[in-house]
Amino acid sequence: MPPKKDASAPIPVKPNALKGKSVIVTGEIDGYSRKAAEQILVNAGATIEKSLNKKVQLAVLGAEAGPKKLEKIESLGIESRDWDDVIEEIKADGNAGPAGGDDEDEDDEDDDEEEVEEKPKPKPKAKAAPKAKANTKAKAAPAPKPAEKPSASSGDGELDGKTVIITGAIAGMTRPAAQKLLEGAGASIAKSLNKSVELVIIGADPGPDKLQKIEDMGIETIAWKDLAEKLGVEAKPEKKVPKVSTGDAPDSVDGMTLLITGNIEGMTRPAAQKLLEGAGATFAKSLNKSVELVVLGAKPGPDKLAKIADLGIETCAFEDLAEKLGLDLDAPPKKKAKKA
């Protein structure tokens, strides 16, 4: 199979939106080759992992991601987000283009496209039919039919003829799979959030900027779980994010075993660790009973928060800790003093 050509232009992104984050892409990205999609994430500061392992902090999902890959992502407790949602979060201000690069301009959505007359292509010369060979091999048994995917009922015409768009993550389902269900119920899927959209379906963790735009445009919304119930589709329960209260930062971390989780604004995680190591802290390789304090950055993973709650480990915000210890975040980290 020839390599996929990039049909869309690169997407301008915020250079530090994914700074310090280890990312992997799985599934098909509409309009982009895997390499081009990864480059967009690299431009936003991400580090691309070559394989799905414990280092990965974010799995970016395209269309038709393999079920085994999705199962492994869930078993490793890796945060996963759809490509469109990630792009919505990291794209540079003023760029309202879609993840696939084919959004329609809101002001020009009713403009008719200019028809271009195509010149007839010359017909290829007919090739001589190959000589038939004797079939000495037994025919392979037909492949088993794949299991049928869930389909939506009409839902009393809930979506019939409506133009809809999904925002946020759909638990247990990729964005393209959810869109196919909606199309089966009579809906048309909009490529971007524009004036033609009549209904927005809200999944888990929708972007705040997207929610604000929906409110400003006055578009009707419905939660995915409520819509799924109306359509007779089983909606998998969303992962509940446990409430982990952020405690006060200690006066000293000298001799303490720490762990950082979440994104540290303007700094990579290794750089933040070196900064705290300079203040006498040591760092655990994983979240376990030896950890005395978890330092929280932005958007820590729900599975990590659940484990923190189960282990009963104290937490504090990175900014509060840096301020309490008097650390200069702009200065290069001090080297940890060697013990005599």
Image: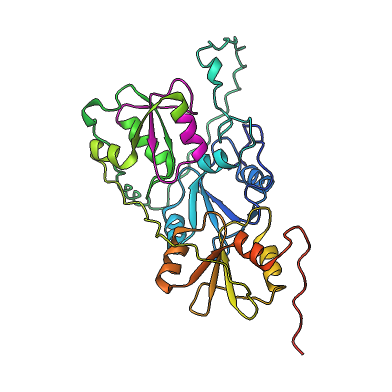
Quadrant of res 250: bottom right
Colour mapping: rainbow
Quadrant of the frame with the N terminus: top right
On the question of residue 135 being in view, the answer is yes
Residue 29 screen position, x and y as percent: 54, 41
On the question of residue 284 being in view, the answer is no
Residue 26 screen position, x and y as percent: 52, 50
Quadrant of res 53: bottom right
| Front-lying residue, 85 or 144 | 85
| Front-lying residue, 44 or 305 | 305
Residue 158 versus residue 277 in the image, above or below: above
Report the label total. Answer: 0
Residue 211 screen position, x and y as percent: 46, 35
Residue 263 versus residue 232 in the image, above or below: below
Question: Which residue occupies 27% across, 36% down?
Answer: 152
Confirm whether the magenta stretch covers residue 212: yes
Question: Which residue occupies 43% across, 73% down?
Answer: 312
Quadrant of the frame with the C terminus: bottom right
Question: Which residue occupies 26% across, 46% down?
Answer: 234
Residue 263 versus residue 16 in the image, above or below: below
Please state if 289 lies on the left or on the right of 271 as rendered.
Answer: left
Look at the image and give the residue range highlighted in magenta: 185-214
Residue 54 screen position, x and y as percent: 54, 66
| Front-lying residue, 335 or 28 | 335
Question: Which residue occupies 63% across, 30% down?
Answer: 94
Confirm whether the magenta stretch covers residue 80: no
